[in-house]
Image (cartoon, rainbow, N blue to C red):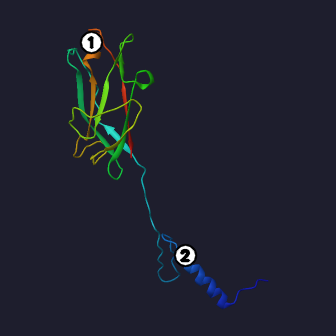
């Protein structure tokens, strides 16, 4: 046989339970029996930090004059969904240990990499292979810059005159550069 608490004890337990539930923010409330019944729920949402780099173009230095340093500057798009558009960029070349080098299978020539967090720049901050350059910001409003601004940053690749003089004429030197954008 069950023993039920007295009505006054049941009322005290109900008040304590109600107080505990009232202190819980974002708690669902249940409807009561009646002609209509209303319940409420709290909804929260968040998204993970994301970034995208687009607008990159291959670089070709063709028949350059070795007495003048070669440089190629291009504008691209970096988008991130962080509060202030913050990101870091890490560049890695295809040379030994990620070095920024071009090779013709027998000879290797270094190149430099610079980055600016604004478009249409011909110089920027020098990047070191495998080291994140932090503190960059983007003004992009869409992941692929389909809405203004259409470009947000600049990539500058250079080969010094000294290194151009080490290259053999009419020989193609190749390499790849990887750029990793991380939201901050």
Describe the element under mark 2 as helix, strand or loop. Answer: helix
Quadrant of the rendering where the N terminus is positioned: bottom right
Q: Do the residues labelled 2 and 1 touch (CB within 8 Å)?
A: no
Q: Residue 55: where, in percent of width, then height?
A: 28, 35
Q: Is residue 36 left or right of residue 19?
A: left
**Quadrant of the rendered image containing residue 119:** top left
Closer to us: 31 or 7: 7
Give the total of numbered labels: 2
Q: Residue 62: where, in percent of width, then height?
A: 23, 17
Please tell me which of labels 2 and 1 falls first in the chain.
2
Q: Is residue 39 above or below residue 85?
A: below
Q: For mark 1, what is the residue?
A: 165
Q: Nearer the viewer, mark 2 or mark 1?
A: 1
Seen at 20% across and 18% down, the residue is 68
Q: Which labelled disc corresponds to residue 21?
A: 2
Q: Residue 151: where, in percent of width, then height?
A: 24, 40
Pick out the residue farthest to the right. Answer: 1
Seen at 42% across and 25% down, the residue is 98
Seen at 23% across and 20% down, the residue is 69
Q: In this view, does 156 lie above or below 12?
A: above
Describe the element under mark 1 as helix, strand or loop. Answer: loop
Mark 1, other Cα within 10 Å: few <14 / some 14–19 / many ≥20: some
Q: Which labelled disc corresponds to residue 101?
A: none
Q: In this view, does 94 lie to the left or right of 19?
A: left
Closer to us: 85 or 35: 85
Q: Is residue 37 above or below residue 43?
A: below
What distance separates the C-alpha of mark 2 from that of mark 1?
78 Å
Pick out the residue farthest to the front. Answer: 162
């Amino acid at each position: 046989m069950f023993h039920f608490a007295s009505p006054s004890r049941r009322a005290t337990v109900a008040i304590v339970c109600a107080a505990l539930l009232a202190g819980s923010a974002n708690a669902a409330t249940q409807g009561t029996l009646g002609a209509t019944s209303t319940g409420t729920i709290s909804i929260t949402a968040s998204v993970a930090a994301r970034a995208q780099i687009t607008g990159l173009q291959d670089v070709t230095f063709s028949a350059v004059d070795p007495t003048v340093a070669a440089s190629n500057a291009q504008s691209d798009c970096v988008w991130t969904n962080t509060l202030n558009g913050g990101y870091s960029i890490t560049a890695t070349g295809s040379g030994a240990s990620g070095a920024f080098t071009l090779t013709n299978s027998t000879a290797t020539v270094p190149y430099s990499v610079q980055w600016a967090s604004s478009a249409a720049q011909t110089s920027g901050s020098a990047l070191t292979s495998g080291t994140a350059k932090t503190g960059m910001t983007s003004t992009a409003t869409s992941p692929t810059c389909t809405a203004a601004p259409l470009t947000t940053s600049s990539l500058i690749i250079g080969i010094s005159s000294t290194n151009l003089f080490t290259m053999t004429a009419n020989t193609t030197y190749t390499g790849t550069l990887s750029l990793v954008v991380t939201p901050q």
